[in-house]
Image (tube, helix red, strand yellow):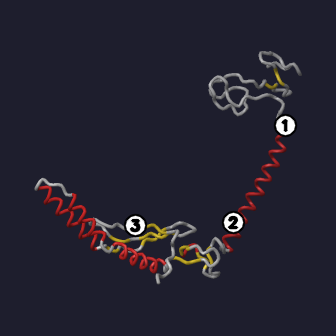
Amino acid sequence: MTSEIYFSSNHRDLCQQSGTGAGFQFEFSCSRCHDTWRSPFEPFTSGRVAGWVGKAASTAWGMLGRTGSSISTAVDGLAGAGWGSARDAAFQRAITNAETHFNRCGRCTDYVCGRCWNAAQGLCLHCAPDTAAEALAARQRGLNDRASERAYEVGQQRAQNFDVTSDRQLVCPQCRAETRGSAYCPDCGHHLAQQDQCGSCSAAVPDGAAFCPACGTRR
């Protein structure tokens, strides 16, 4: 009976069946931080021999001016001999080795590395976060939330002096630059739809007027 295979969803097969670099290697990843660990490389002797034979035979046949299709078929057969069983055995050894680098959470069943493991609780840090870290994070969230509330209140106070009735062009119709509600385009100086305000009484001054129509102050 075949033993149970773990790490079915967080491993990557790096094995190479043929060539001088033929061998077995697997990469496992932490389900929380996604850091990886690779198993030691194990050479696949049959695949390496096939690579050497194929290279030598191709060179020899090439010198004779012949094609190497029959050689390729033979080399592929040599490389494939015993590949499946050898890979399965190497994978099982890699899993046994990986189990010393990862911990299986009893709650969510994820495999995590040592940095993502709460040894005191026997659970991953996703299911059992570190109390000190959570307290500091909560304190920072509270600080940020309260600062945002205060800033919002300041904005509400400033809004009392903001003229919400005047039309504003947020994009200059002449150069298409962003105006941010100003009276003149900051890029080309084009006069926008917003009317000028009197520097004395803040009343709207019509375009081209020499004096404020509300208080008579000269522009």
What separation in Å lies between label 2 and label 1 (alpha carbons)? Answer: 37 Å
Instruction: State the CA–CA distance, disc 3 to disc 1.
Output: 66 Å
Density class for disc 2 (Cα within 10 Å; few <14, some 14-19, many ≥20) is few
Q: Which residue is mark 2?
A: 137
- The residue that mark 3 highlights is 14
Name the residue rendered at 20%, 67% in the picture. 53
* Residue located beneath label 1 in the image: 161
Q: Residue 23: give x, y in percent of width and height.
A: 33, 70
Identify which residue, 43 or 142, lies in the foreground: 43
Disc sitting over residue 87 in the figure: none
Q: Residues within 10 Å of mark 1 (few under 14, many from 20)?
A: few
Kind of residue at disc 2: Ala
Question: Looking at numbered disc 3 in the image, what kind of residue is underneath it?
Answer: Leu
Q: Nearer the viewer, mark 2 or mark 3?
A: 3
Q: Residue extending furthest right? A: 214
* In this rendering, the label closer to the viewer, 3 or 1: 3
Query: Which comes sooner in the sequence, label 2 or label 3?
Result: 3
Dot 2 falls on a residue whose secondary structure is helix
Q: CA distance from mark 2 to mark 3?
A: 39 Å
User: Which of the two labelled residues, at mark 3 and mark 1, occupies the earlier sequence position?
Assistant: 3
Looking at the image, which is closer to me, 121 or 55?
A: 55
Which quadrant does the C terminus fall into?
top right
Question: Residue 153 appears at what percent x and percent y?
Answer: 82, 49
Residue drawn at the location 24% of the way across and 68% of the way down: 50
* Mark nearer the N terminus (2 vs 1): 2
- The residue nearer to you, when weighing 58 against 68, is 68
Mark 3, secondary structure of its residue: loop
Total residue callouts: 3
Secondary structure state at the residue bearing disc 1? helix
